[in-house]
Image (cartoon, rainbow, N blue to C red):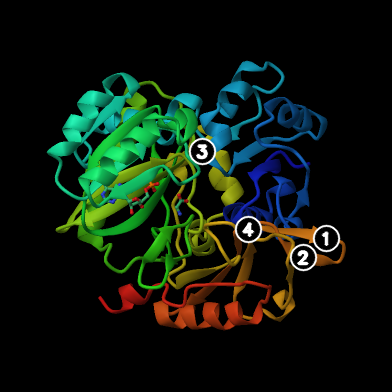
């Protein structure tokens, strides 16, 4: 294998991982790509392997047996549990770079209370907050009484995207705090953050950092609610667009100076090893950007519009990230708009059925069908999760890209299929 090529193991199984696998597999420097455990889509970009990303010992053994030279971590959980540190501490694995932060860095996502303190230490704009535990619950309930409405309550730890509750009454907030501290989200809720509600428009910003410098990737806007017009329960994300028209040069300057730079410098100052993605969940309030949350990984479905717009070779980008030479890289972006619409299983984000046969994928033209909850079953592809297919398209503008995503979303069929038809509409009306 030529010295500049890599044998890569990508961990994860969602739409984000299919988009990353798709991009990696286009690189001349990708000698071999394994995805663990992957889905029916990633199987077309490389070889799926039945490994659990949380079983670090098996992941490590696989890397040695298969001469892996780079591990790319898609989801947050292996990072929050310390996969980077595991590779550092095991002598035989130390030479294999892991793209993703150390456990100490992943805490940016793994503990909301920690990330709020980090933002305060480094003067990064975010909503005002207080934190409470079982021991201080009486004080917490008292604090809620005088809080303005709505009240945002957040379970401190990872709660599978369900840990944020926006309460419209004091009674609801008090009950929610009691339930969270009482174990509703297990240990993730043993500490609760009470946050001021920010009213504005949200967008997602991504950087890749090597711990010294950073590179900004295309921004995106995610549509989190299940229903059209942003109604109903929160989901993992029902669609996304990139670029985001309201993120203009003035906004970019504010985001970079007030948020990105102090975050990367803050990690450096606190000597926290971080070679991976930082996802800034931001909100624009009266023209000013605030941080809603950090994630220590890429977003899903944002990756399904970010990767298609990234022109750089992704293996080269990761290689520079691992070596600490990202400063050499210039990011180059496709000027076209990319949109994605998620086809989801009926009932999602509540209970839904799995194992439904998916047809029509071979008829998709002019879009890329990124797979999320899919699995191969004999000759067929069947549903295997709530979010099933992210239909991504390019266009000269949002409506042009969306027309293609919608047309192809109509061609793919499975029992109970649902998708939002209004993704991006709010932006075209601005
Ligand atoms: P998260 O699970 O942290 O992504 O939060 C889920 C969603 O809750 C965010 O995307 C926002 O829409 C909303 N949210 C979180 N914190 C706030 C806040 N302080 N003010 C308003 N909305 C918020
Ligand atoms: N789309 C939001 C996330 O990945 O957390």
Question: Where's residue 230, x and y in %?
Answer: 36, 67
Residue hosting label 3: 321
Q: Secondary structure at mark 3?
A: helix
Q: Position of residue 48 (x, y in %)?
A: 77, 49
Instruction: Give the class, few, some or many, for how many residues have Cα within 10 Å of label 4's Cα (few <14, many ≥20).
Output: many
Cα separation, mark 2 vs mark 1, equals 6 Å
Reading the image, the residue beneath label 1 is 377
Q: Which residue position holds label 4?
A: 372
Depth check, mark 3 against mark 1: the one in front is 1
Look at mark 2 in the image and give the residue it sits on: 381
SS type, badge 4: loop
> Helix or strand or loop: what does disc 1 sit on?
strand
Which quadrant: the N terminus?
top right
Disc 3 to disc 2, C-alpha distance: 35 Å
Residue at the (28%, 62%) spot, across then down: 247
Indicate the quadrant containing the C terminus: top left, top right, bottom left or bottom right: bottom left
428 over 192 or under it: above or below: below
| Mark before the other along the chain sequence, 4 or 2 | 4
């Amino acid at each position: 294998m030529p010295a500049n090529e890599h044998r890569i193991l990508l961990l994860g199984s969602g739409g984000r991982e299919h988009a990353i696998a798709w991009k990696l597999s286009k690189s001349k420097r990708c000698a071999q790509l394994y995805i663990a455990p992957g889905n029916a889509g990633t199987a077309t970009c490389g070889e799926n392997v039945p490994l659990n990303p949380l079983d670090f010992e098996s992941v490590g053994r696989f890397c040695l047996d298969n001469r892996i030279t780079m591990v790319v971590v898609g989801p947050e959980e292996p990072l929050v549990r310390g996969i980077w540190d595991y590779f550092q501490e095991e002598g035989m694995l130390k030479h294999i770079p892991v793209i993703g932060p150390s456990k100490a860095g992943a805490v940016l996502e793994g503990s909301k209370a920690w990330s709020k303190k980090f933002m305060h230490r480094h003067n990064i704009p975010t909503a005002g907050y207080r934190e409470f535990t079982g021991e201080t619950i009486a004080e917490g309930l008292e604090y809620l009484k005088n809080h303005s409405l709505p009240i945002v309550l957040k379970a401190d730890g990872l709660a599978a995207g369900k840990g944020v509750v926006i309460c419209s009454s004091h009674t609801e907030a008090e009950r929610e705090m009691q339930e969270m501290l009482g174990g509703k989200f297990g240990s993730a809720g043993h500490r609760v953050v009470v946050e001021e509600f920010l009213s504005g428009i949200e967008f997602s910003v991504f950087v890749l950092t090597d711990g010294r410098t950073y590179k900004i990737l295309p921004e995106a806007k995610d549509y989190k609610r299940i229903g059209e017009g942003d109604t109903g329960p929160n989901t993992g994300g029902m669609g996304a667009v990139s670029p985001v028209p309201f993120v203009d040069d003035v906004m970019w300057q504010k985001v970079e100076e007030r948020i990105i730079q102090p975050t990367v410098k803050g990690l450096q100052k606190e000597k926290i090893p971080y070679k991976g993605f930082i996802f800034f969940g931001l909100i624009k309030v009266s023209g000013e950007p605030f941080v809603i949350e950090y994630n220590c990984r890429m977003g899903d479905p944002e990756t399904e519009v970010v990767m298609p717009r990234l022109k750089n070779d992704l293996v080269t980008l990761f290689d520079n990230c691992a070596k600490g030479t990202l400063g050499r890289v210039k990011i180059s972006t496709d000027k076209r708009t990319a949109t994605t619409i998620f086809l989801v299983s009926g009932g999602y984000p509540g209970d839904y059925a799995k194992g439904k046969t998916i047809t029509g994928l071979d008829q998709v033209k002019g879009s890329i069908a990124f797979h999320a909850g899919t699995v191969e079953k004999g000759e067929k592809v069947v549903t295997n999760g709530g979010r099933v297919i992210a239909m991504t398209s390019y266009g000269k503008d949002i409506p042009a890209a969306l027309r293609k995503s919608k047309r192809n979303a109509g061609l793919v069929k499975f029992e109970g299929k649902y998708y939002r038809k209004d993704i991006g509409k709010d932006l075209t009306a601005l």
